[in-house]
Image (cartoon, grey):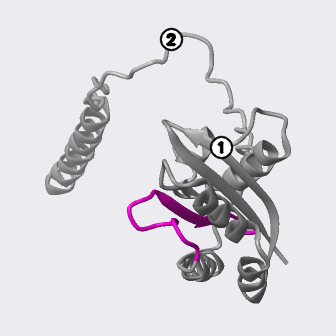
Amino acid sequence: MAKRIWAVLFGVVAVAMIVWWVGRRQAIPVTPPPADTGVRVVRVGPPPQPSQPQPLPTRMPHAAPAPLAVPPNPGAGDDPVAQLIPPAGSDPAQLHARFRAEPRDPAWAARNEAGLRNALADVPQIGGGNALAVRCATRLCEVSGTMTPGLPEADGNRTMQALQGDALSRRAATLGLDGRMTSFGSSNGRPTFLLIYTRK
């Protein structure tokens, strides 16, 4: 009987110890995880505005190219012809102004300049030691020069008649030129002449 009582007491004590141990575990506080100590950056000021769409660049129209200036006739600037023609407003002066304004047709001008020089070689007192300029542009040709001063009147008349005569006109016609004007004058004590031809 005594053994049974001790067995019961032992069982009661064991149960009591188990209950005490379980209750003690539940009473242990659980340490919470450490708080987040990171620094958060807060944007101060008004909220950002949504970006406005940028307008597409306007395509600038291309400027119209400037018209090309017609090049002046090479060599038509400072020339002795300006000293030989009558005053402004006359027909020779107007034709000379047209000649200076024309561009040069290289092939046509060179061919007719050579042809006129060959034709003038047959005219007495022209060329040689006397000034002679033969120049062509596009539709006009000018021939100017001086004659030997102090010639006998008959020789001077013969030269002027040859410059206006049919023989020189026919030679010019074979080149495709029409005689437009002949003018005579004087410069620095020397007789001068000016011939102007037009392209047919």
Amino acid bearing label 1:
Gly
Instruction: Answer yes or no: is residue 137 visible.
Output: no
Please state the horizontal and vertical placement of residue 25, each as a whole percent of the image: 25, 37
Identify the residue shown where x is 54% and y is 39%: 187
Amino acid bearing label 2:
Val
Q: Quick check: 130 left or right of 26?
A: right
Instruction: Say which quadrant the N terminus sits in.
Output: bottom left
Q: Give the mark toward the camera: 1 or 2.
A: 1
Q: Quick check: 103 left or right of 118?
A: right
Q: Is residue 111 above or below residue 85?
A: below
Identify the residue shown where x is 60% and y is 47%: 81
Q: Quick check: 128 left or right of 177?
A: left
Residue at which label 2 appears = 44
**127 magenta-colored:** yes
Please state the horizontal and vertical placement of residue 181, each as a whole percent of the image: 80, 59
Q: Is residue 54 above or below residue 100?
A: above
Residue at which label 1 appears = 185
Q: Would you identify the image quadrant in which residue 107 lies?
A: bottom right
Q: Secondary structure at mark 1?
A: strand
Q: Which residues are magenta?
A: 123-142
